[in-house]
Amino acid sequence: MSQIRLSALVVAHNEEDRLDSCLERLAFADEIAVVLDKCTDNSKLVAEKYTDRLLEGSWDIEGDRRNEGLASCRGDWILEVDSDERVTDELAREVRLLIETTPFDWHEVPVDNYIGERLVRYGWGGSFGTSSVPRLSRKGAKIWGRQSVHPSLTWNGTKGPRLQGALIHHVDRNISDTIRRLDSYTTAKARDLRASNNIGSTANNVRRLFSRFFKCYVLRKGYREGSYGLLIALCAGLYPLLSHLKAKLEDD
């Protein structure tokens, strides 16, 4: 039997409708740890069906709650999974084999992003989505930054090759959900900009609207997704401008 232990870490906020199907896919891990952030629904009851490793609290900074979750894990390796993501059988097998042999300290995991029932492979980027995420790491190799949204990462150790198996990510239920996510992301980013005392210039963020749109729609081949690619490119382009305007015009 392997002596290398794997922890699966899930951070959730009011995810009772999605948490069950996320956690049931993590039985291949040696332990499941769940961070419950400001949960007022039945997320705790759902989580208790799968683990007693629960950390309840209230965090305003995304990086802080993720770091506390990492610290609570007892495994040699940690796989971070969001409640709207699903680990496939292929990915589960690959992770278990890899941690037995890899000389590296962290690996990126590919992501298959869905909007509703539509798989959208191309065009992600510009802080509005990604096609791979750095989620598999040795314990102690990863430290999240203290940002409210899209926290930075500090690594101790070396990066290995990207895995082949993909996480299934139900990123948005529909287009209205996509727009709500843009609003939520830009509000959190505006908070970080105000805290840094450097909100940037309107002119520069207007320029970034066009450069990010071009990068997502053309360079990252969002055009291959038709109208979905156009939607993603628009949101990616608007993200820095809306964040800047909220930081400039609003107090909180």
Image: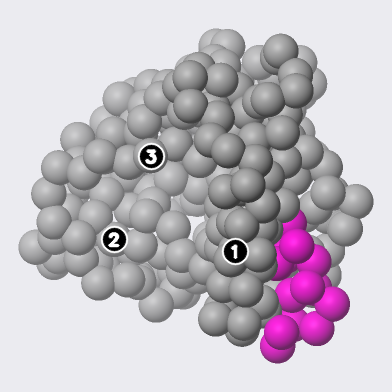
Question: Is residue 219 positioned above or below 195 on the image?
Answer: below
**Between discs 1 and 2, the one toward the N terminus:** 2
Precedes in sequence: disc 1 or disc 3: 3
Q: Position of residue 199 (x, y in %)?
A: 55, 30
Range of magenta residues: 223-236
Considering the whole magenta stretch, tell me its main secondary structure: helix
Residue 137: % across, % down: 27, 49
Q: Is residue 199 visible?
A: yes
Residue topped by disc 3: 152
Name which quarter of the figure residue 235 lies in.
Answer: bottom right
Q: Which residue is mark 1?
A: 212
Cα–Cα gap, marks 1 and 3: 19 Å
The amino acid sitting under disc 2 is His
Tell me the mark number nearer the camera, choosing from 1 and 2: 1
| Residue drawn at x 46%, y 65% as measured from the top left | 132
Q: Quadrant of residue 99?
A: bottom left
Residue at 62% x, 82% y is: 218
Residue 177 in the image, given as x and y percentages of width and height? 84, 49
Q: Residue at x 24, y 55 (%)?
A: 106
Q: Is 216 in front, or is 121?
A: 216
C-alpha span from label 2 to label 3: 16 Å
Q: Residues within 10 Å of mark 1 (few under 14, many from 20)?
A: many
Residue at which label 2 appears? 107
Q: Amino acid at mark 3?
A: Ser
Residue 20 visible: no
